[in-house]
Amino acid sequence: MKSPMYDNVFSLDPDGKLMCTISMKKARWYIRKGIAEWCDKDGVKIALDETDAGGTASCNDGVDARYIRLLFKPKGGTYQTEGSLENLYLRTPKQNVCVSCGDDGYHMRHFIVPYSYRNLLTDEYKSHMSHDIVILCPTCHVNCEKMSKKRMRQMEDELRSKRPGDSCCSPVIDDQHLHHVRSCAIALVKWKKNMPHEKVESHERVVREYLASIATRADSKGSLLNKEEELTKFQLQSACGVNYRVKNPEYVSGSELVVQSLNGDPKPIEQFIVGWRNHFVDTVRPKFMPVGWSVDSPVVCGRNSVDIGDDGDGVKRW
């Protein structure tokens, strides 16, 4: 990352009560919209140029901090139970260090739930949810990715084995028409002089029809189809290089297969996310996780974690 992941700007409600820490980008967005103001730690407005690095004040421990006070009352779901882990997570400044080894040098943003899965989940599981995005140094990131990839393959192979014929289904297939276009173009380039006139015309017709189908100008299409000009070397080379390997419409990627198996049901999705959190903790053994972070933290912003295990004793592993 080119800049620190956490800016640790303290966001206060209109009464000056601490709600959470946010990014400098979000803080400045609030300021520009006129719905927040820079303030000190007690919520008292301070004058600050918008081009400044942000309202710098001093915490009790002497560490520089930045504060904004909202000028509107946030909707429900903003406040967590006092003393709860979620409360601590939201309000406590986060260190810009590798959560595994504590290295404070070059960092990488790491998705605890693999990005290829997370990207396919609905927005409620991604919007305003930072629990499953942490910092790792390059070495720890590589080691973690190896274990994550292994688990992903196991999950995907298990699901694919339950789909008849899916194990041998290729992600790409040959488009027979495009393959024919390419073959005709190659033949014209290499052997046109030795080919019968009828075959040359047949091959050129195939190439012309293809080039006309991808032409953007109407006059170019007409010129190709009406044989007004000889096919140029560039046109033939273009047809020779056509990619006839296309996406197989019947193929379902491993990531899609896994997310589809959750059926959009909140309970399996929570089990899935918590399962990846457990995997991360078990494999990385992080020693520097943000204060208040927990495998049982909510998976949706503003929603309390619920017990959905089969025996009611917590979320079961996916």
Image (spheres, grey):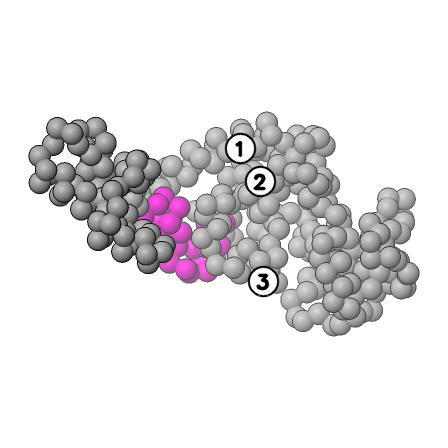
Magenta highlight on residue 265: yes
The residue that disc 2 covers is: 110
Magenta highlight on residue 258: yes
On screen, residue 204 versus residue 113, left or right, reads left
- The numbered mark, 1 or 2, whose residue comes first in the sequence reads 2
Q: For residue 242, which quarter of the picture? A: top left
Image position of 55 with respect to 206: above or below: below
On screen, residue 263 versus residue 176, left or right, reads right
Quadrant in which the N terminus is drawn? top right
Most common SS among magenta residues: helix
The residue that disc 3 covers is: 303
Number of numbered discs visible in the structure rendering? 3
Residue placed most toward the observer, 51 or 218:
218
Tell me the mark number nearer the camera, choosing from 1 and 3. Answer: 1
Task: Give the CA separation, mark 1 to mark 2.
Answer: 9 Å
Q: Which residues are magenta?
A: 252-273
Image position of 250 with respect to 190: above or below: below
Q: For residue 285, which quarter of the picture? A: top right
